[in-house]
Image (cartoon, grey):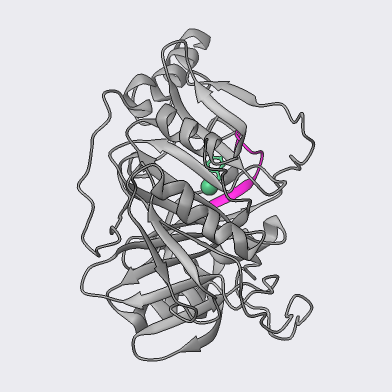
Amino acid sequence: MPVPAPDVVRAADAELAVTDLPRARRFWVDALGFEAIEEDDEVIYLRGYEEFLHHSLVLRKAPEPGLRRLAYRVRTPEDVQRAEEFFAAKGLPTQVVPAGTTRGIGEAVRVEDPLGFPVEFFHHAEHGPRHVQRYDLRRGAEPARIDHFNVLTPDVQAAHDFYAELGFRTSETIEDDDRLYAAWMFRKSTVHDIAFTGGAGPRLHHIAFFVPESHHILRACDILGATADHAHIERGPGRHGVSNAFYLYLRDPDGHRLELYTSDYYTGDPDHPTARWSVQDPRRRDFWGHDVVASWYREGSTAFGLDGEPKPLVHPPVSEETVHVGADGIGVVTEARLQQS
Ligand SMILES: O=S(=O)(O)c1ccc(O)c(O)c1
Ligand SMILES: [Fe+2]
């Protein structure tokens, strides 16, 4: 008798290990505009203005940077128990953590998924003050809420198949006749809660935060330019092919990648179709055909297991970067330009 999957509502919380908390606070709070709703010498709880749960992201001081957990909210308290049974039935590590282990979060279960990532499922959560219309407080990029996680994994097909078993549906893919290079999967009615980027893993690729409008992304660029912190800008701003979202990728002081993301689309109907992109299409990752900087494919954050130890990396047989002739479409675009000249 298969163990039923928990009813996942959305990607809702995450925790990053950072090596210098005041330095991280200057970036995430002073520059980007997240609200620090609770903090001490060891930890900062950050919150987006649309979020009604206690927080959106936890930054915890540690000797080494890395990903400590990706957290999904589930629909009922019984789904927390269901999550534990679902992963335990697959022989995967699980641990129940008492309420308050993470401030504002009730009893939760932490697991290592088959990809090697530390994943948490929770239901009970304190509600924080509603700041969505506190325009007197909103600052920087005015981050609204967590939108999705993106992880580096050597076998995107296996990752896709497992999260499909967990009840996620697929909104978009990048593929060719031989393999699936990337996939975007969702539980909430938008393009994704989790996405898989082919590469050595398990590593975190990025955590994305929804911002209300594209001008908030441009404001983040201007703020970082104004303080001569432009080196934090890694890729963009631009328009994604996959997801159609307007985007910007930043690297925080510890190298953690975050995305500011807006204007993707609704996916809530039961027969929502999957959009499939060819790995040879130069518009797939940037709709305007802009190349993707190599670091975006190659770099990610270490993932810590439930034991707190860094997870060893497994390398993929083939990477999108190499299949697509250089970092991302340089060969294809160059050929096209040469043919025009
Ligand atoms: O670069 S992609 O267009 O593939 C893309 C689409 C949506 C995302 O959230 C993302 O990080 C990357
Ligand atoms: Fe993303």
Residue 93 position in % (x across, y down): 32, 53
Please state the extent of the stretch shown in magenta in the rendering: 240-249
Residue 42 position in % (x across, y down): 34, 86
Q: Main secondary structure of the magenta part?
A: loop
Which residue is farthest bottom?
40
Q: Nearer the viewer, residue 168 or 252?
A: 168
Residue 75 position in % (x across, y down): 67, 59
Q: Judge from the rendering whether residue 56 lies leftward or rightward of residue 119; answer left or right.
A: right
Q: Is residue 144 magenta?
A: no
* Residue 131 placement: quadrant: bottom right
Which residue is farthest front?
1
* Residue at x 42% of width, y 37% of height: 197
Residue 110 position in % (x across, y down): 41, 61
* Residue 214 placement: quadrant: bottom right
Residue 328 visible? The answer is: no
Q: Is residue 277 above or below residue 298?
A: above
* Residue at x 48% of width, y 33% of height: 160
Q: Is residue 72 above or below residue 29?
A: above
